[in-house]
Amino acid sequence: MRGVEPMNAFSDHPHRRYNPLSGEWVLVSPHRSKRPWQGQVEDAVTEVMPAHDPECYLCPGNTRVNGETNPDYTGTFVFDNDFAALTEHAPKERFEDGLLLAEGECGICRVICFSPRHDLTLARMAVADIAKVVDTWVAQYEELGIHPDISHVQIFENRGAMMGCSNPHPHGQIWASRSLPNEAAKETENQRAYYEKHGKPLLMAYLEQELALGERILFENEGFVVLVPYWAVWPFETMVLPKRHIRSMEEMTEKERDELAEALSKVTVRYDNLFKTSFPYSMGFHQRPTDGDDHDEWVMHAHFLPPLLRSATVKKFMVGFELLGSPQRDLTPEQAADRLRDLPDIHYLAD
């Protein structure tokens, strides 16, 4: 079918959608889920946690496994990861023997505590406090990005035990590496190719189209838009995009930092309200590499990749065809956007 024909031609039939950022396809099978909310839907039991846990190695004043004592911090707190996946002094040698190839990879891994409060999440934090987290991300991107052996700064958060998070204290991580990781390399290549061909950033063109259509938009303020991407893989996947061409975090104005904080609050609150649970996800920012090039093709953006599908305990598994072929989804991105957009932006536990 030609692209000018209405999208509803695919509404009841399997089809593929193309992700221009990654250059990959996702299979959409809407006919398998005409009523996506069938089956049991149960709320998770809400765990009541203390504001300070004496056994938590991230809480202020507590001792970490390496023997260091955390300061009595009142805002954000950053430290080098005690179990870093990358180290600064890894060998840089390269080994190659036919099809066998390996090379050393050095880097820096850090942990960022978002709040001294053990019982909070981004969804439960005030926007002003999330803005302090954004400020910390910016400072870390700038500090690590000027390191001569760092070409990529990956800021991310794994939220919830379902996503492998070992500690409920609100925190995220940074892995800064000498080489571009796979996803960043794909996004760099595809954004560069589009920019060279069209003279404008791919994600700015994409956002213009999404804003004109409106059907996948969840929230927008003056600086940022939250949407379900047309090519979403995970059931309630979202992206956060700036309204102007911002290549990386340090280019944001102070006002835009506050607007980003508001956007992060709006999407995480909606996530929690969806199944009345502390919603698990992996979230991370993609932004221009720190290899010294201008990278005018790049637009900073955040990906939220949550696993939940039908309830607080039923998640989407990537198995079988999805591992061996390509990702597949039943719930369309448009259905997911409708579901999230209709939720209140006041947290269900606010009272």
Image (tube, grey):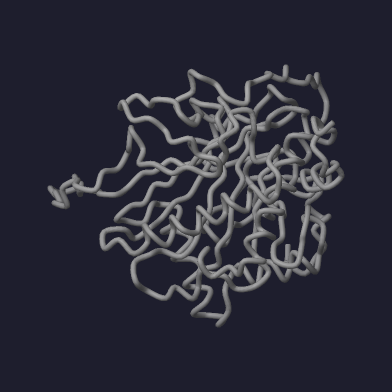
Quarter the C terminus occupies = top right
What residue appears at the point 68 percent right and 51 percent down from the top-left corner? 128
- Asked whether residue 123 appears in the rendered view, the answer is yes
Quarter the N terminus occupies = bottom right
Q: Give percent across and percent down for residue 125.
A: 68, 41
Q: Is residue 192 left or right of residue 238?
A: left
Tell me the quarter of the picture where residue 111 sits: top left
What residue appears at the point 60 percent right and 73 percent down from the top-left corner? 245
Quick check: 346 above or below 194?
Answer: above
Q: Give percent across and percent down for residue 28.
A: 69, 45
Q: Give percent across and percent down for residue 327.
A: 58, 42
- Asked whether residue 16 appears in the rendered view, the answer is no
Quick check: 348 above or below 291?
Answer: above
Q: Give percent across and percent down for residue 2.
A: 73, 67
Quick check: 114 above or below 176?
Answer: above
Name the residue nearer the viewer: 182 or 246. 246
How many marks on residues? 0
What residue appears at the point 72 percent right and 60 percent down from the top-left corner? 225
Quick check: 225 above or below 59?
Answer: below
Tell me the quarter of the picture where residue 81 sits: top left
